[in-house]
Image (spheres, rainbow, N blue to C red):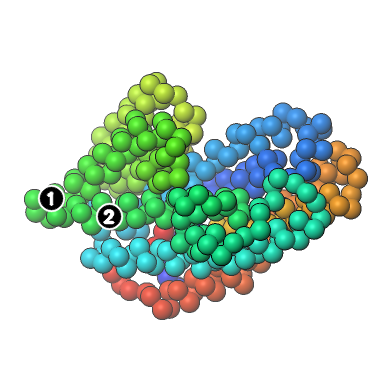
Amino acid sequence: MAEARAPGKSSRLAFIDALKALSFQLIVLHHLAFYGPMSDHAYLLAPDLIHWLSQDARMAVQVFLVIGGFLAARSLAPTGVLLTPHPLVLVQRRYLKLVTPYLAAVLIGIACAAIARELMVHDSIPGRPTLPQVVAHALLLQSILGYEGLSAGLWYIAIDFQLFMLLVGMLWLAPTLARGDTGVPTVSALLVVTLALASLYYFNRDGDWDIWGIYFFAAYALGIVTYWATHRRQTLGWLLPMVGLVVTALLLDYRPRLAVALLVALTIGLARIYGFLDDWPRSRLIAYLGQISYSVFLVHFPICLLINGIFARFAAADPWVNLTGMFIAWLASISAGALFYRFVENPAQRGFWRAHSQPSFKQIP
């Protein structure tokens, strides 16, 4: 999700930024349509659109999963061999990189929810937090321990961290299982594919597993395999089996989210093969929206909740007024994300790299 880079070293991929920018806007609009009273009032004006946003736009999460796997492979093991011999250090740094801005956003969410409770009564408002609940969020264990989320979407940060740990663990294990250094990439690939198949054919078919990273690993692995496939000469030898396994799984148990993940993986793969992954589209606005996407993701729900409360308290229940409120909340979410990136995420990441930069690996995805 969030991507950090060492000072002075650009690691932006224009096409990836464009996908992130689009997908995060869909998630903001999904939460606006799904939560809060404004969408209930505005529903009469655009029922099909609001229904689609509230139900189907959440599939944009699959874009994040595929991109996360692609960037993790690019950063940690572009040839299938872990670039650093210190996996626990990688996990620690990933945790700190994710959680530093995340905790600031949790505090913002708690404050905005408290204000919203004074403005309206609605089931979209998180309950008053308890200390164990906050600690569980800080440890990224809130879903596993059964606590209500303090903001919409925070569950994904925990899943992202679990997926990262799974990949690092397999990459660390591969040299132990391989016969000689030349076999490490093959073993890494086999481990990733084996866990992906377990996810694809078993875990992802049971919703009870959706608090664990393995439920989502199939989509994450599509990004990993796409990177490794397009990093080698035998691209079709990697991509065709990947497509075949996913299509077979879809025929067995059709899941639209996996179809979206496969489409995204193939699109990224084609973008890399045909050479426009790095520098297309050439748009500063899209690049900037992609850059601040993690910050927008972290703060958009508290902002939307607050504006829902203001309109519920002071505005009429008119559909046009509330549709205008949704538009204002969308713009406010982007603006708040830009401010959060400038004053929280970016300074935190700069401090992170100054304190922890090492030449042993390029970046933490």
Where's residue 184, x and y in %?
Answer: 17, 51
Q: Secondary structure at mark 2?
A: helix
Label 1 crowd (10 A; few <14 / some 14-19 / many >=20): some
Rendered view: 278 above or below 217: below
- Residue at (60%, 38%) from the top-left corner? 57
- Residue at (33%, 74%) from the top-left corner? 358
Q: Looking at the image, which is closer to me, 10 or 361?
A: 361
Q: Residue furthest bottom?
A: 355
Name the amino acid, label 1: Ala
Q: Which mark is residue 178?
A: 1
| Picture mark count | 2
Q: Looking at the image, which is closer to me, 145 or 70?
A: 145
Label 2 crowd (10 A; few <14 / some 14-19 / many >=20): some
Name the amino acid, label 2: Gly
Where's residue 128, x and y in %?
Answer: 66, 58
Rendered view: 121 above or below 209: below
Q: Secondary structure at mark 1?
A: loop
Q: Is residue 52 left or right of residue 246?
A: right
**Residue 81 seen by the camera:** no
Rendered view: 83 above or below 221: below
